[in-house]
Amino acid sequence: MTRGVNLLPWREERRQRQRRSALTASVLVAVLTLGALGGVWWKQNSDLNYQNSRNQFLQQAIARVEKQLREIRDIQKRKDELMARMAVIRELEEERTKLVLGMTELANSSPEGVFFSSLKRSAAGVELKGVAQSSSRISALMKQLTGTPSFDRPELNIINVGKTQEFELSVSTPQANALSGSAPAKP
C-alpha cells in the first residue's frame, strides 16, 4: 500500500479561508448595518428638524394672525362704540327738534287765560303746572293738547279752585307710549 496523501492541511486551510470569509462577511454586514442605521437616524433627524422648522413657521404665522384678530376686535369694538355714540347723537338731534315742535305746539294750543308756571319733562311725558282763569279753559287746553302730534292723553292731577284755578297737568308723549309698548289711545 502506498502511503496516502495527507488531506488534513488542505482541509485546515480551507476552514481558515472559510472562517476569514465568514468573518469578513460578518464585519461587512455589521458595517453595512451600522451604515444603514446611521443613514436612517440621519434621515429621521433631518426630517424632524425640517418639521420643527415648519412648526415654528406656523406658530409665527398663527401669532401674527392672532395679533391681527385682536386688532380687528379692537377696531370692531371702537366702531360699535362710535356707532352707539352716533345713534345717541342722532336721537338727541331728533329729540331736540321734537322738543322745539312740542313747545311750539304747547304755545299755539294754549287758550287765552292759561298761564304756565313750570314745565317738567320726564320719560313718561311732560308735567305742566300753571294758573287758568277758569276750569273751562283748562278743559279746552286738554282738548287742544290731545289733537297735537307731540302730546297725547292729558290727565289733570290737581286743581285748586279759588279766584284763579291752579292746576297740575300730566301729558304723555308718543315716544313715551312707544317705549312702554302701549299704543297711543285718544279719548
Image (tube, helix red, strand yellow):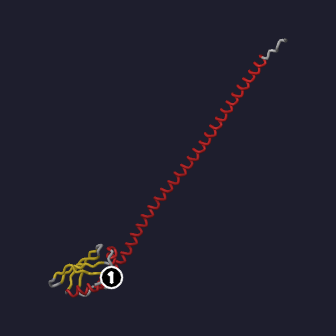
- Looking at the figure, which quarter contains the N terminus? top right
Which sits in the foreground, 77 or 35? 35
For image coordinates 21% across by 88% down, the residue present is 136
From this viewpoint, which residue is outermost toward the right? 2
Rate crowding at label 1 as few (under 14), some (14 to 19) or many (20 or more) other CA atoms within 10 Å. few
Instruction: Tell me where residue 140 appears, x and y as whole percent.
Output: 25, 87
For image coordinates 51% across by 56% down, the residue present is 68
Is residue 29 left or right of 157 when viewed as pictured?
A: right
Which sits in the foreground, 48 or 109? 48
Where 118 falls versus 135 (above or below)?
A: above
Instruction: Tell me where residue 18 appears, x and y as whole percent.
Output: 74, 24
Instruction: Tell me where residue 96 appears, x and y as whole percent.
Output: 36, 75
Picture quadrant where residue 129 is located: bottom left
Numbered circles on residues, count? 1
Q: Secondary structure at mark 1?
A: helix
Name the residue tied to disc 1: 104
Where 82 falls versus 160 (above or below)?
A: above
Which sits in the foreground, 113 or 20? 20
For image coordinates 15% across by 85% down, the residue present is 163
- Looking at the figure, which quarter contains the C terminus? bottom left
Amino acid type of the residue that numbered disc 1 sits on in the rendered structure: Thr
From this viewpoint, which residue is outermost toward the front? 1
Is residue 33 left or right of 122 when viewed as pictured?
A: right
For image coordinates 26% across by 84% down, the residue present is 142
Picture quadrant where residue 119 is located: bottom left
Instruction: Tell me where residue 58 appears, x and y as whole percent.
Output: 56, 50
